[in-house]
Image (spheres, rainbow, N blue to C red):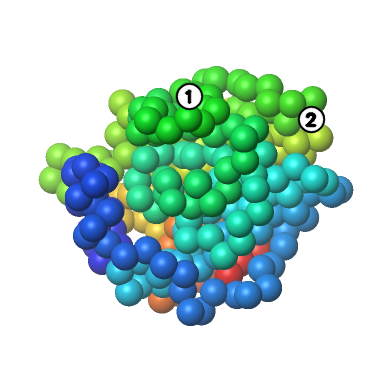
Amino acid sequence: MNKIGVIFIFLACIPCSMGCKLIKIEISDKRNQNPQIVRPGNNIEVTSTGLTRISGTDFFPSGFRILENDKLIYIDPLALSDTDRADYIIITHQHLDHFSIKDIKKLLKPETIIICPESVADKLQRYDYMIKAVKPGDLIDLDDNLTVEVIAAYNLHNALLWFKAHPKSKQNAGYVLNINSIRIYHTGDSDYVPEMESITDINLILVPIGGDNLTMNADDAARLVNHIKPEFAVPMHYETGESNGLERFRMLVNKNTSLLLLQ
């Protein structure tokens, strides 16, 4: 198991007030200053929030910025370079590489809505934020051209002894964003689970490949992509120094899906 995997399994078991002191999350000096853009539909731009250094290891996180005309959405913002104010902030679960209160504060304006699982909402209770707590199976209409489907995200296998890093009981979330009929699926930290079998008509999938029984590995991620058959696929949640997983994912993904490696 790699270093990042061990850190986050450990942090899942301890309060954030302690865990936040044990690791250092910062902008990587290798971060691309001109973010690459994925355009899954007219007037929709998707970029990564950027390469992040976690306890000295460069890591491509699960943070993304989605701009549709003048509407701005962030998913799991982490170690942000930009601080444009968000209309919506979407959080998949409470682990520190996904749920950063410091970065959420940078993005807030009075009307910002935070969409998150109950476990995250509980941690935000002391703040005067607009919060929509969700659970897998929910369908939310946020405005005239944005709906969000909440998809289960969890581990099937133990990561350490009897411990699952993302147990089903936590009701962590992945999300399908339907923006003007363009469908973007962010899986969250999850294995390839049965709830994913019925997901269809995806234009862009954001899928983890890091493995270590924390998320899908390259093989399972490619299997999910090939089942869903999106137009575009972006791998996420992996150490950039581990090139074997990226190459294997690239080799296994069906050629009808355009594979995009963001930095």
Q: Residues within 10 Å of mark 2 (few under 14, many from 20)?
A: few
Tell whether 227 sits left or right of 243. right
Q: Position of residue 219 (x, y in %)?
A: 45, 55
* Number of the label disc, if any, that sits on residue 145: 2
The answer for how far apart the CA atoms under marks 2 and 1 are is: 20 Å
1 up-or-down from 124: above or below = below
Which quadrant is home to the N terminus?
A: bottom left
Residue at coordinates 27% horizontally, 54% vertically from top-left?
20
Q: Where is residue 3 shown, x and y percent of the image?
A: 26, 66
Q: Quadrant of residue 94?
A: top left
Give x and y (percent) for residue 161: 13, 45
Q: Is residue 249 visible?
A: no
Residue under label 1: 133
Q: Secondary structure at mark 2?
A: loop
Q: Give whichever of discs 2 and 1 has the lower sequence position.
A: 1
- Residue type, mark 1 in image: Ala
Query: Horizontal and vertical percent for residue 133?
Result: 48, 24
Taking the view exactly as shown, the residue that stands out farthest to the bottom is 29
Determine crowd level at label 1: few under 14, some 14-19, many 20+ residues with C-alpha closer than 10 A: some
Q: What amino acid is found at the position of numbered circle 2 in the picture? A: Asn
SS at circle 1: strand
Camera-nearest residue between 232 and 24: 24
Q: Nearer the viewer, residue 127 or 176?
A: 127
Taking the spot 43% from the left edge, 33% from the top edge, the residue there is: 127
